Image: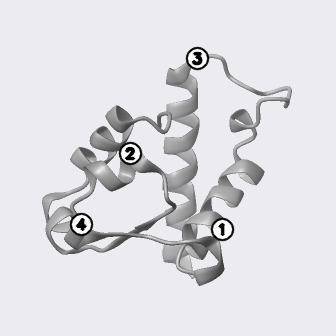
């Protein structure tokens, strides 16, 4: 959770498990903060036309559809960050549980 600043990018990268930081490859858009925080050997900036960001774009859309608190103009929008984090946490655990049942 956060804005698209360099500080948020650093926090995101630091929150990843060490094995991901050492082995995973990250595709992002061309936002400068990602380029300066994620090591070059683990990162590639790509456009949407490549299809390499499709999975995360699909997940972001699923978040917007299923977690109405994240949509600013909805009646259930939360003003408190704590409520957003709780709603996202509940969604992720429920979503993952559904996927494990399939």
- Mark 4: give few (<14), some (14-19) or many (20+) Cα within 10 Å: few
**Given this view, does label 2 or label 1 mark the residue nearer the observer?**
2
- Mark 1: give few (<14), some (14-19) or many (20+) Cα within 10 Å: few
The alpha-carbon separation of the residues under discs 4 and 3 comes to 35 Å
* Spot occupied by residue 23 in the image (x, y as percentages of width and height): 18, 74
- Mark 2: give few (<14), some (14-19) or many (20+) Cα within 10 Å: some
Check the image and tell me how it is coloured: one colour
Give the left or right position of residue 92, taking residue 72 as reference.
left
Q: Earlier in the sequence, mark 1 or mark 4?
A: 4
According to the picture, the residue beneath numbered tag 4 turns out to be 40
Using the image, determine if residue 94 lies above or below residue 47. above
According to the picture, the residue beneath numbered tag 2 turns out to be 33
**Given this view, does label 3 or label 1 mark the residue nearer the observer?**
1
The alpha-carbon separation of the residues under discs 2 and 3 comes to 25 Å
**Given this view, does label 4 or label 3 mark the residue nearer the observer?**
4
According to the picture, the residue beneath numbered tag 1 turns out to be 58
The alpha-carbon separation of the residues under discs 2 and 1 comes to 22 Å
Of residue 36 and residue 97, the one placed in the foreground of this image is 36
Is there a contact, CB below 8 Å, between mark 2 and mark 1? no
What residue appears at the point 14 percent right and 68 percent down from the top-left corner?
22
* Spot occupied by residue 87 in the image (x, y as percentages of width and height): 58, 37
According to the picture, the residue beneath numbered tag 3 turns out to be 80
């Amino acid at each position: 959770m956060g804005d698209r600043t360099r500080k948020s990018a650093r926090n995101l990268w630091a929150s990843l498990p060490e094995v991901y930081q050492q082995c995973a490859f990250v595709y992002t858009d061309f936002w400068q903060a990602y380029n300066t925080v994620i090591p070059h050997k683990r990162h590639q900036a790509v456009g949407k036309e490549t299809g390499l960001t499709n999975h995360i774009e699909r997940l972001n859309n699923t978040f917007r559809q299923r977690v109405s608190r994240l949509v600013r103009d909805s009646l259930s929008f939360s003003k408190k960050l704590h409520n957003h984090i709780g709603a996202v946490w509940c969604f992720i655990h429920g979503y993952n549980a559904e996927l494990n049942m399939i």
